[in-house]
Image (spheres, grey):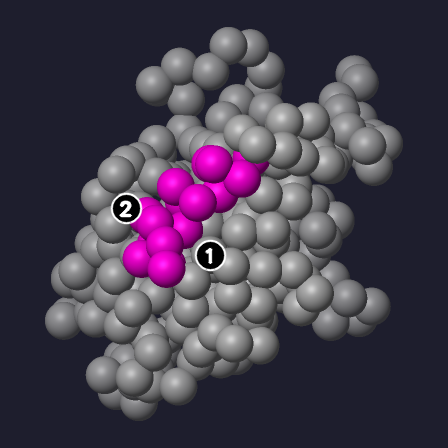
Amino acid sequence: MTGTPTSEVPMVHADRVSKSFGSLEVLKSISLTVNRGEVLCLVGPSGSGKSTFLRCINHLERVDAGRLIVDGELIGYVERGDRLYEMHPREAARQRRDIGMVFQRFNLFPHMTAVENVAEAPIRVKGMKKDDAYARARELLARVGLASRADAYPAHLSGGQQQRVAIARALAMEPKLMLFDEPTSALDPELVGEVLQVMKQLAESGMTMIVVTHEMGFAREVADSLVFMDGGVVVESGDPREVLSNPQHQRTRSFLSKVL
């Protein structure tokens, strides 16, 4: 599937995606679609395949079968005839530039200030002029509520502040899709809200987002759709409010009884 992206082309289309680590089958023929401007929340127990699926979307993990298409472009592979061949790492990295990802851990460079962390990739990867990159970085830090902490080093920032810097850093590359892998799981409870508020504002701005989370309140309020995964399969999906208040599958009911 190639060609000029249009508003009718989904931002993400997963078609029977499978992934194994040795004999362990982590993803078992996952199919789902995320349209432009939508927020999808992935929920489920640890080990259900949520984070692996997220990493497959930007080819941090290779898929063993199926296809992942982002904005009309096959991710990580080129199609010749009826066969798929893995892209050169340089080409995969080019695709990855358009997909922002925020991890559980903040992964900031400890020897760089917040503004330096945010400006680094646009300068090195996109060739942006240093002054322009720093101006843009300060704008983004202001957007996530950290204008006054731009010159602070990560060691002098709270976990919630570090995660907001990580979000600003991902936004600095002007991604068309944002992936969040349990972005609040490493935070103290009182710091969770500040990160979720930034993510809510991103959603309201129209950013397409896929969020692996255990924050069911966020899923209920912000997500357009919710997918419950277990054992590498999609057990149940639908409107978040409907799935959370009236789950149809016993496995979903059992999980939600423990987290709600």
Crowding at mark 2 (Cα within 10 Å: few <14, some 14-19, many 20+): some
Mark found first going from the N terminus, 2 or 1: 1
Q: Magenta region, mostly helix, strand or loop? A: helix
How far across and how far down the image is residue 54, in percent? 56, 54
Residue at x-position 35% and y-position 32%: 36
Q: Are marks 2 and 1 in contact (CB under 8 Å)?
A: no
> In terms of secondary structure, where does tag 2 sit?
helix
Question: Range of the magenta residues?
Answer: 133-148
Answer left or right for 105 relative to 252. right
Q: Nearer the viewer, residue 81 or 47?
A: 47
Res. 203 mark:
2
Residue at x-position 58% and y-position 19%: 1
Answer left or right for 152 relative to 36. right
How far across and how far down the image is residue 198, in percent? 30, 57
How far across and how far down the image is residue 117, in percent? 60, 53
Which mark lies nearer to you, 2 or 1?
Answer: 1
Task: Answer yes or no: is residue 44 visible.
Answer: no
Res. 150 mark:
1
Q: Is residue 9 placed above or below 44 in the rendered structure?
A: above
Q: Is residue 183 placed above or below 260 in the rendered structure?
A: above
**Residue 137 forms part of the magenta stretch:** yes
Task: Answer yes or no: is residue 135 visible.
Answer: yes
The C terminus sits in image quarter: bottom left
How far across and how far down the image is residue 122, in percent? 62, 35
Q: Amino acid at mark 1?
A: Ala
Which image quadrant is residue 75 in?
top right
Answer left or right for 219 relative to 176. left
Q: Nearer the viewer, residue 241 or 169?
A: 169
Answer left or right for 5 relative to 257. right
